[in-house]
Image: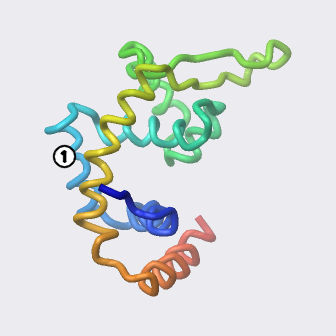
Amino acid sequence: MAGPDPERLAVLHLFREANAILDRALTVALDEEREMPLAWFEVLNVLQASGGKLRVLDLAERVVATPSSLSRQLTRMEDDGLVRRDRGNADDQRAVLIVLTREGRETWRRTNTTYLRVVKRMFTGHLTDTDVANMHRVLSKLLENR
């Protein structure tokens, strides 16, 4: 099964911010099929797309979370072996990196199949190329001043 193209995924990420119905469907499917909270999947997904590691502040920005709430979540994910903290640059102890572990990558791969199936069924499977371009333009405008 081919997944959505990058343009449709970009629109999805914009759309998800405003679409509680899709979030709920994703939450239910991920929980029932993979026992994975949506917030955890979002962290794994951002890390996977970023080459497997990010600074905590950059990760918090990309998953739209406060660093303190993300830190608690990361502790639980670290306990489950999905991520690890790395001091990165010894000269800058503030620059803590969150690194996707092998178990985290494997979990992301398995969980991503559920995620993409729901996304295609509820969102991207209904959009033409014109729809995608228009939604991207409109949602980007809405998010410019956040």
- Please provide percent x and percent y for residue 130: 45, 87
Question: Where in the figure is residue 97, as x and y percent of width and height?
Answer: 64, 24
Q: Relative to 144, say whether 44 is above or below.
A: above
Image x and y of residue 139, in percent: 50, 75
Colour scheme of the rendered structure: rainbow
**71 left or right of 29 in image:** right
Report the side of 140 relative to 45 (left or right).
Answer: right
* Residue for point 46% across, 79% down: 135
Residue drawn 64% across the image and 16% down it: 86
Q: Position of residue 69 (x, y in %)?
A: 46, 32
- Is 120 positioned to the left or the right of 40 in the image? left
Residue in the picture at 20% in, 55% down: 25
| Outermost residue, front side | 1
**Is 70 placed above or below 134 here?**
above
Q: Disc 1 residue type?
A: Ala
Front residue of 69 and 17: 17
Q: Which residue is mark 1?
A: 29
Q: Residue at x 37, y 57 (%)?
A: 3
Crowd band around label 1 with a 10 angstrom C-alpha radius: few (<14), some (14–19), many (20+): many
All told, the count of numbered labels is: 1
Quadrant of the image containing the N terminus: bottom left
For numbered disc 1, what is the local secondary structure?
Answer: helix
If the image is split into quadrants, where does the C terminus sit?
bottom right
Residue positioned most to the left: 32
